[in-house]
Amino acid sequence: MGNKTLLITGGAGFIGSHVVRLFVNKYPDYNIINLDKLTYAGNLQNLTDIEKNTNYTFVKGDITDGDFIQKLFQQYQFDGVIHLAAESHVDRSISNPMEFVYTNIIGTVTLLNAARSLWKDNTDGKRFYHISTDEVYGSLGEEGFFTEETAYDPRSPYSASKASSDHLVRAYFHTFGLPVVVSNCSNNYGPNHFPEKLIPLMINNIMTNKPLPVYGEGKNVRDWLYVVDHARAIDIIFHKGVNGETYNIGGYNEWKNIDLVHLLCKIMDKKLGRTPGTSAQLITYVKDRAGHDLRYAIDSTKLTAELGWKPSLQFEEGLEKTVDWYLANESWLKNITSGDYLKYYEQQYHNR
Ligand code: NAD
Ligand code: DAU
């Protein structure tokens, strides 16, 4: 592979930390720079196992700070960028859309500008890889899948900000010849997932015997992929993807929210030595999310056929691994669920 200096943004977050770990361990000749603002979602505890590796450097900073980003690109002379930094939670985008506009849109353009000016004379071997989401495609009915050709139809401030950033990345390819690649992935789950999101929130609430807040009737469907499989896809697309192309990533693993919560309750009753059916009694239907997308499902045929990626884990196996990780890392969860998280939880779920 040769030497490369790579910028990974958002590497202290959920998916980013798995991507950083994979690259630091798999590519000892690469120089990996993890740039993260350490918002509420960024946590360096996610990376303690690799933080001392000589091919790894952490830099604290904000992707919306143009001068800082230009200097960082000059200092490190990056060969590649894998851009994951974002505001990522739909519910927060409903209560505070502006943060999503700043980080997801302005932050992405700030990085594109820096890459463009650094690589203006030579783009050989350079690559800007933008990590996006299936939510940009909108909401499916009972049938069908999102393909790379599906028209964009974002419906939350989060997905609209991601859609906007995707368009800008592609515009820099067409207008300026910037070597870009984009992927759109379905819902991830696994270790280090912040407990504002469905699966870790339910695990945390089951562990602490709190109500399990299911939005609406629990009939919304998500397509779940183990986070390490997403990181593997990112590795393959970064190295083998074609400039200007988009790749959908998904697990062919659709679950209605209520069925998923019941499965989690069943797994956790067993692990916690509770009588079967105990945790399910905590299920509480609450007011629906505004503009709640009904169903996401990804067609990842292109990625499998052209680049040879396939998910490696069955869902039940991945979910058990995930629950085991949370049970073995209670201190990680406790550190996060004290302080600001309690305030967030109160605002989000009080009177719902
Ligand atoms: P996350 O919220 O767990 O992590 C985001 C990281 O970005 C955090 O470490 C945070 O500190 C950092 N960050 C936020 N604002 C920043 C800024 N202005 N400057 C620098 N760093 C900043 O998110 P995640 O779930 O790991 O998602 C990562 C990426 O993958 C996002 O772009 C998201 O849209 C995309 N994605 C997520 C999923 C999913 O299921 N979680 C699925 C598909 C795509
Ligand atoms: O599809 C990819 C997207 O998946 C990513 O782009 C986002 O960053 C990520 O947050 C995720 O978005 P979702 O909105 O699908 O994930 P979330 O975990 O917030 O919700 C999953 C489903 O569970 C959704 O239908 C809403 C529901 N839900 C969620 C929470 C937090 C509940 O019923 N109760 C809850 O308390």
Image (spheres, helix red, strand yellow):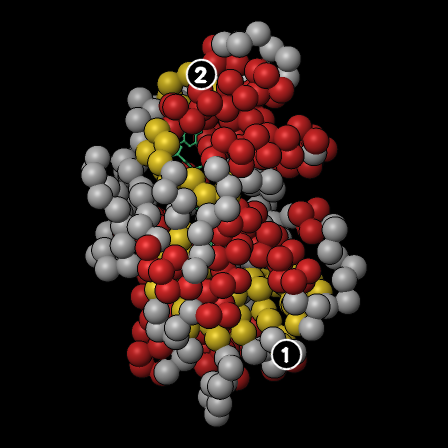
With respect to residue 206, does 106 lie above or below?
below
Q: Position of residue 324 (x, y in %)?
A: 64, 30
Residue at 69 percent across and 73 percent down: it is 29
Which residue: 39% across, 75% down? 243
Counting residues from the N terminus, which is met first, the one under dot 2 or under dot 1?
1
Q: Position of residue 28 (x, y in %)?
A: 70, 68
Question: In this view of the protein, which residue sits in the foreground, 87 or 182?
Answer: 182
Mark 1 residue type: Gly
Residue 192 at x, y percent in the picture: 60, 42
Pointer 2: residues within 10 angstroms few (<14), some, or many (20+)? some
Q: Which of the pair 237/204 is nearer the observer? A: 237
Horizontally, residue 152 falls left or right of residue 302, namely left
Q: Residue at x 51, y 50 (%)?
A: 229
Secondary element at tag 1 = loop
Q: Position of 333 compared to 291: left or right?
A: right
Residue at the farthest top position: 275
Is residue 59 at least partly visible in the picture?
Answer: no
> How many labels sit on residues?
2
Question: According to the image, label 2 marks what residue?
Answer: 283
Relative height, residue 298 to residue 4 (above, below): above
Q: Quadrant of residue 341?
A: top right
Label ID, residue 2? 1
* Quadrant of the picture in which ligand 2 is shown: top left
Residue 206 shows in this picture: yes
- The one nearer the camera, 311 or 4, is 311
In terms of secondary structure, where does tag 2 sit?
strand
Q: Amino acid at mark 2?
A: Ile
Residue at point 33%, 48% (across, down): 298
Q: Residue 230's mark?
A: none
